[in-house]
Amino acid sequence: MNDGRPLREAAVDLSAIAENVARLVRAAGTPHAMAVVKADGYGHGAAPAARAALEGGADWLGVADLAEGLALREAGIGAPVLAWLHDPDADFRPAIEAGIDIGVSTLDQLEAVADADAAGPPAVQLKVETGLSRNGLSPADWPAAFERAALLERAGLLRVRGIFSHLSNASPEDDAAALDSFRTALTLAADAGLEPQLRHLASTAAAIRRPETRFDLVRLGIGAYGLSPFGDASAGELGLRPAMTLRSRVAAVREIDAGAGVSYDYTWRAEAPTRLALVPLGYADGVPRAASGRAEVQIGGRRHPVRGRIAMDQLVVDVGESAVSVGDQVVLFGDPASGCPGADDWADWAGTINYEIVTRIGPRVQRTYS
């Protein structure tokens, strides 16, 4: 039955985000906590997720780029924000004047921020490379970067509020090496005369399991949305509750004979007569095609297998003799405690990670909030 819900819906429970953040903040015990709301809040909606996370006890927000930070300001969110991944030709002035901290990963960025001609000195947080081989000041550049940053700070051209990096979570040994490297960076920064208020290295995984990496602030990403960063512990075992439920409605039901093929390439043919339900969600909506022939959905409290290829706009489910009708609710994933598949299940079926499952949900899927 259509109860007024959208045809394609990602229902987000904001109380789950607030509760997850509160739990992680208590566990970490750091003076500060950052909720990471980049990529539209991991697909949940950046502004609603940010407000829920702040309600749960986060006092910082993290985004990838300046546009994401400015969108939070346009949504009326005044909490401290850090943005750390920039266009080489970025204009930093609007973000600085909006009170957004600039993550600095190169000497060129440091100079560009200092030259932004904004009202008041910008706040920067220096990103140091400690093993991921991505963005961040190279160890070879640390002495020069810290000395230059200290000089610019003394001249009143910027303020170094933080120094941060990121762990690979590859192994305890790799993370220990990154921690040692980060501590070296902090020592060199202090030797240059920098006194950052915020030192941060830990994201959700380290916030839970590596207390020595927590420093002044932890960055809460996937855990804020109720998903586990670990392969050996579920969200439920960590006391987290998934915030997103992806659902739709049965668009059609048909009976097929033995031998009938289903969807493109006929990768599945019915071994016996059965009934199929059509669900109007596909890979254009972020449902991974790689899960074809392996995934399950929930209809009427029961799980049913997806048959054949997942297409751009639709997928087909084998409902057998179950009493499934047009208009019945279909849950692709949500909280496994309710019996439905979780984002982790879809990640396993597609050979990916839960982060990607929720983040890839497309714009045709309407986000609703409760």
Image (tube, helix red, strand yellow):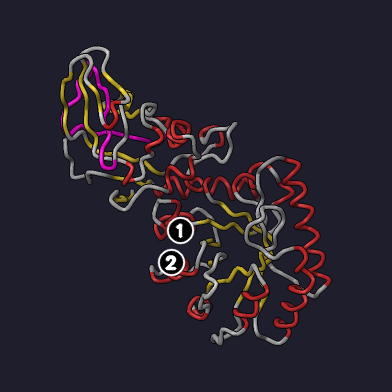
Magenta stretch contains residue 357: no
As displayed, is residue 295 above or below residue 147? Answer: above
> Would you identify the image quadrant in which residue 82 lies?
bottom right
Quarter of the view holding residue 275: top left
Query: Looking at the rendered structure, which numbered label has been put on residue 50?
Result: 1
Identify the residue at horizontal 51%, vertical 45% (top origin): 20
Within 10 angstroms of label 1, few (less than 14), some, or many (20 or more) residues?
Answer: many
In front of the other: 232 or 311: 311
In percent of the image, x 75 and y 73: which residue is there? Answer: 146
Please name the amino acid that badge 2 sits on.
Leu
Q: Is 296 positioned to the left or the right of 171 in the image?
A: left
Relative image position of residue 133 (x, y in whole percent):
67, 55
Residue 259 pos. (x, y %): 23, 16
Q: Are marks 1 and 2 in contact (CB under 8 Å)?
A: yes
The answer to whether 264 appears left or right of 45 in the picture is: left
Label 1: element kind:
helix
Q: Residue furthest front?
A: 265
